[in-house]
Image: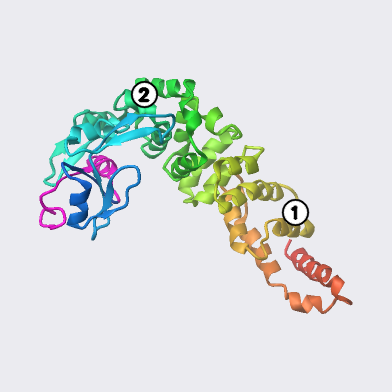
Amino acid sequence: MSADPVVVGLQAYVVGGAVRDALLGLPHGDRDWVVVGATPEEMVKRGFIPVGGDFPVFLHPQTKEEYALARTERKSGRGYKGFTFYTGVDVTIEEDLRRRDLTVNAIAQTTTGALIDPLNGQADLQARVFRHVGEAFKEDPVRILRLARFAARFVDFTVAPETMALCRAMVAEGEVDALVPERVWQELSRGLMCAQPSRMVQVLDDAGVLPRVLPQWQSSEQVLAAIDSSMAHTLPLDARYAVFCLSTEDRAGLSRQLRAPGDCADMARLLPVVLGACQVQQSAESVLSLFEICDALRKPERLRALLRTATVVADLNIAQWEARLTCVLGVDAGKAAQQANQPSEIKAAVRQARLGALARVI
């Protein structure tokens, strides 16, 4: 590491999640670095690629890992963007760590492996406690969302009572009202992919955040159990989001509010339709109608994904539904169209052929 000519001579530290996860014995992804005592000009001269907006962040030219200059921050407005940053060469690693969210994320490691832990993050890791670094936590409402996501990922951790009290105070003071949909979706989508998403919901509920950032969303015991079961079923994000929305009446409104991706919004809209159709006596007409509503003839894989998702909350015979879909997809539309007496009857003739095929397998 020290032989790297781009880095040699820099006072650089690995920080954040990479250090936390390594101490927990967990695999980690890319490392984030903090550099102390350097200027933007020096970083560029060494070959780092500047990518930062509000404050100096650089990419290593080979590894592409992020190197940020040590900084302090001061609240200058509402919301998560209301900060003024200072990145002078006199900022220490300890000062940089003190601006972070949780003590377990405020541990740095030198290139030789030594740990710098001014906020006792290692003790909180051992105690499995999420504790805020300081009062500055309340200046950034995104930190509540991150805390909830961490609770969903690290299921044996608890939130320190004083940290939860601070979150509630932030809600009462209106700080979370400054959250924008993109940031809410970013943290929600990540949390849904964690080990126990219901813990994310619980933390947000305990803090009083849900009515402020997700007013349309409606919870139920079935939904909370199902989003946790989604992990065991290894469902993708769009399926997990559909399960998350299952008890919500205004699913379209929730998706618009969150600015959820189109595939997620479509799955949330169609999953209740699939569940409703699967829980009643089926006829060729009802099955074909479901396929048409789901656009299954053009997008059969989406219907298959919907059926797999439905098994999280209902007892479905997937093989039976797959046989029905295969049956309809196997109808020769061209041959069926030849049975029509005039062009205006082609659509009906093809549909009738599909109904006939379904009648033979239902």
Mark in front: 2 vs 1: 2
Q: Position of residue 264 (x, y in %)?
A: 56, 50
Q: Is residue 355 left or right of residue 41?
A: right
In the displayed structure, would residue 91 be above or below residue 256?
above
- Crowd around label 1: few <14 · some 14–19 · many ≥20 (10 Å): few
Q: Position of residue 82 (x, y in %)?
A: 40, 33
Residue type (three-letter) at the residue carrying disc 2 = Thr
Instruction: Identify which residue is drawn at 59% across, 35% down.
Output: 217
Q: Position of residue 74 (x, y in %)?
A: 32, 29
Name which of mark 2 and mark 1 comes first in the sequence: 2
In the displayed structure, would residue 107 be above or below residue 61?
above
Residue on which the image places disc 1: 282
Q: Position of residue 25 (x, y in %)?
A: 24, 43
Whether tag 2 and tag 1 are in contact, CB under 8 A, the answer is no
Residue 360 lies in the magenta stretch: no
Determine the secondary structure under disc 1: loop
Taking depth in this image into account, of 353 and 148 the one nearest to the observer is 148
In the displayed structure, would residue 171 be above or below residue 227?
above
Which corner quadrant holds the N terminus?
bottom left
Residue type (three-letter) at the residue carrying disc 1 = Gln
Determine the secondary structure under disc 2: helix
Residue on which the image places disc 2: 163
Task: Please provide the residue range marked out in magenta.
Answer: 1-29
Taking depth in this image into account, of 21 and 235 the one nearest to the observer is 21
- Crowd around label 2: few <14 · some 14–19 · many ≥20 (10 Å): many
